[in-house]
Image (cartoon, rainbow, N blue to C red):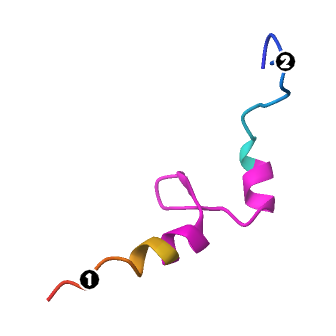
Amino acid sequence: MDPPREDGRRCLHAFELEEMGWRTDGHDRLFDPAGSQRAGGRFPKAA
């Protein structure tokens, strides 16, 4: 960040997220597949 934050926090780059297991969907948006799977289990299936 410019200027750097005092606490050292910053946004992660796409390559850093991909190294952590995040993936890109068909629209070049990043998502966490593990988080998506956990969230999907909390909703009932459509009839």
Q: Is residue 26 magenta?
A: yes
Q: Which residue lies furthest to the front in this view?
A: 7
Q: Which residue is drawn at 54% across and 52% down?
A: 28
Q: In this view, does 24 lie above or below 13?
A: below
Q: Residues within 10 Å of mark 2 (few under 14, many from 20)?
A: few
Please give the range of residues in magenta.
15-37
Q: Compared to 9, does 28 lie above or below? A: below
Looking at the picture, which amino acid does disc 1 mark? Answer: Pro
Q: In which quarter of the image is residue 40?
A: bottom left
Badge 1: how crowded within 10 Å, few (<14), some, or many (20+)?
A: few
Identify the residue at horizontal 50%, vertical 70% (top origin): 36
Labels 2 and 1: the sequence-earlier one: 2
Image side of residue 47 versus residue 40, left or right: left
As drawn, the label of residue 25 is none
Task: Tell me, for residue 44, which label it has, or none.
Answer: 1
Residue name at image x 60 percent, y 73 percent:
34
> Residue 44's spot in the image, x, y percent?
26, 83
Q: Residue at x 59, y 63 (%)?
A: 32
Q: Quadrant of the C terminus?
A: bottom left
In the image, taking residue 25 as reference, residue 41 lies left or right, namely left
Q: Mark 2 points at which residue?
A: 6
Q: Position of residue 15 (x, y in %)?
A: 78, 50
